[in-house]
Image (cartoon, rainbow, N blue to C red):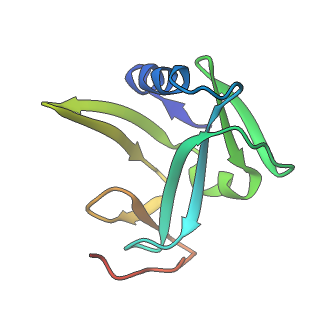
Amino acid sequence: MIEISESAIERIKDMLAEQEIPNMFLRLAVKPGGCSGFSYNMGLDDDEGEADVFMDIKGVKVVVEKEDLRYLNGLEIDFQESGMSGGFTIHNPNAIASCGCGQSFRMRNEEGKPEVCD
């Protein structure tokens, strides 16, 4: 199960409303790479695949490839505003370590593909 805070849901709904392409949804993914071995990928998409799992989270269509669910089960996404900026934050209970930027994480039994941090 993936949890998304009310503030994050509102921001995602705003982003979806700004799109000119109908039927857009939020796609969450995990890719090998980043400082700690795996990186999060979060963005808007309209291309559905056979390996996709669809969820409705508070009225937002969220799509995750079936293989990535093992990394994202229990994931919590929030949106926090700070002064003139803001951004999404991710808390992943499956990660044993994460990079300072919060975009990369390490799993207990999988190394991923760690890269040098800039």
Q: Position of residue 14 (x, y in %)?
A: 46, 21
Going by the image, does 91 lie left or right of 62? Answer: left
Q: Position of residue 63 (x, y in %)?
A: 68, 40
- Tell me where residue 20 sits by quadrant: top right
Going by the image, does 45 lie left or right of 85? Answer: right
* Residue plotted at (23% across, 29% down): 81
Going by the image, does 1 lie left or right of 85? Answer: right
- Tell me where residue 86 sits by quadrant: top left
Locate the C terminus by quadrant: bottom left
113, above or below 50, in the image: below
Q: Position of residue 6 (x, y in %)?
A: 43, 19
* Residue plotted at (38% across, 22% down): 7
Question: Is residue 33 or residue 20 the one in the foreground?
Answer: 20
Question: Is residue 57 or residue 23 the one in the foreground?
Answer: 23
Q: Position of residue 109 (x, y in %)?
A: 57, 74
21, above or below 110, in the image: above
* Residue plotted at (49% across, 30% down): 4
Locate the N terminus by quadrant: top right
Which residue is situated farthest in the front direction here?
A: 20
- Tell me where residue 62 sits by quadrant: top right
Which residue is situated farthest in the left direction here?
A: 83
103, above or below 112, in the image: above
* Residue plotted at (57% across, 59% down): 30
Question: Is residue 49 or residue 56 the one in the foreground?
Answer: 49
Image mark count:
0
